[in-house]
Amino acid sequence: VFIGRIVEVEAYLGKTDPASHTYRGKTKRNEVMFNEGGYLYVYFTYGMHYCCNVVTEAGGIGHAVLIRALEPISGTDKMRKNRGLSASDPDKLLTNGPAKLCQALGIDKKDNGTDLLGDEIFICDDKAHTKFAIASSPRIGISSAADKKWRYFIKENSFISK
DNA sequence: CTCGTGATTGACT
DNA sequence: GTCAATCACGAGC
C-alpha cells in the first residue's frame, strides 16, 4: 500500500481552458472528466507516460485537477522497484513529476475512472501537516493559456517537480 | 551543471 | 499527418 502527500497540482477548467483535454467537448478518451467529482482520470501521453487527475465539479462540466507531484510517505521500497531505481536514489526522484508518480504508484489505463470514494485509491485529510504556504505559477508543459497561473504547490517543499 | 532530443500511443483535423 | 498536461539520457560547457 502506498501513501503520499500531494504537494503540487494544476487546474484544468474544461470549456474555458484551451489547454484542457475537455476544451473541445467530450471524446472517448476524456469521458471520465465529464463525470461528477470524485473520480480518477488517467490519460496516456507522449507514447509512454500516464498522468492522473482528480475530477471536480458536477457531472457534465469537465473540470479536473492534475496531480503533478507527491511527497512519498509509505511504500517507498515498492515505488523504487516500480520506477526501476536503486536503493541509493533519493526519495524525491520517485514522485516529483506527473508521469513519475503514476509509474511509482502503478497507476495506468486500468485505473482510469476509479471512484476515489472506494477503498483502492482515495484522498484523505492530512491532519499532521496543516500549516504550509501555497504558491502559484504558470502551468508546465503546455503551449496555450500559458499566462494562467493555475499551478499550485507547497512553497519550499523539495518534492515538487521544479 | 544545463541544454537538446528521441521515444512512441491515441485522438483529432 | 500532426499534436499532445513528459521523462531520461547523452553531449557539451
Image (spheres, coloured by chain):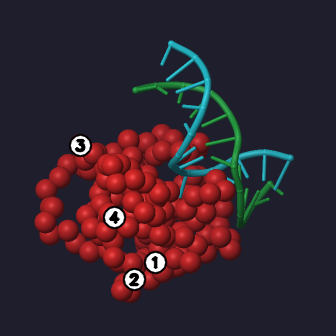
Chain colours: A red, B green, C cyan
Asked if one can make out residue A9 in the rendered structure from this viewpoint, the answer is no
- At x 40%, y 53%, the residue is A86
Front residue of B4/B7: it is B7
Q: Report crowding for label 2: few under 14, some 14 to 19, many 20 or more residues within 10 A (C-alpha).
A: few
Rendered location of residue A158, percent (x, y): 27, 45
Mark 4 secondary-structure assignment: helix
- Marks 1 and 4: which is nearer the front? 4
The three-letter code of the residue at mark 3 reads Glu
Mark 2 secondary-structure assignment: loop
Which residue appears farthest toward the bottom when viewing the image? A118
- Marks 2 and 1: which is nearer the front? 2
Tags 3 and 4 touching, CB below 8 Å: no
- Marks 3 and 2: which is nearer the front? 2
Subunit that carries the residue with mark 1: A
Is residue A137 shown left or right of residue A140?
Answer: left
- Identify whether A22 is placed above or below A91: below
Front residue of A13/A51: it is A51
Q: For mark 3, what is the residue?
A: A156
The three-letter code of the residue at mark 1 reads Tyr
Which mark is first along the chain, 4 or 3?
4
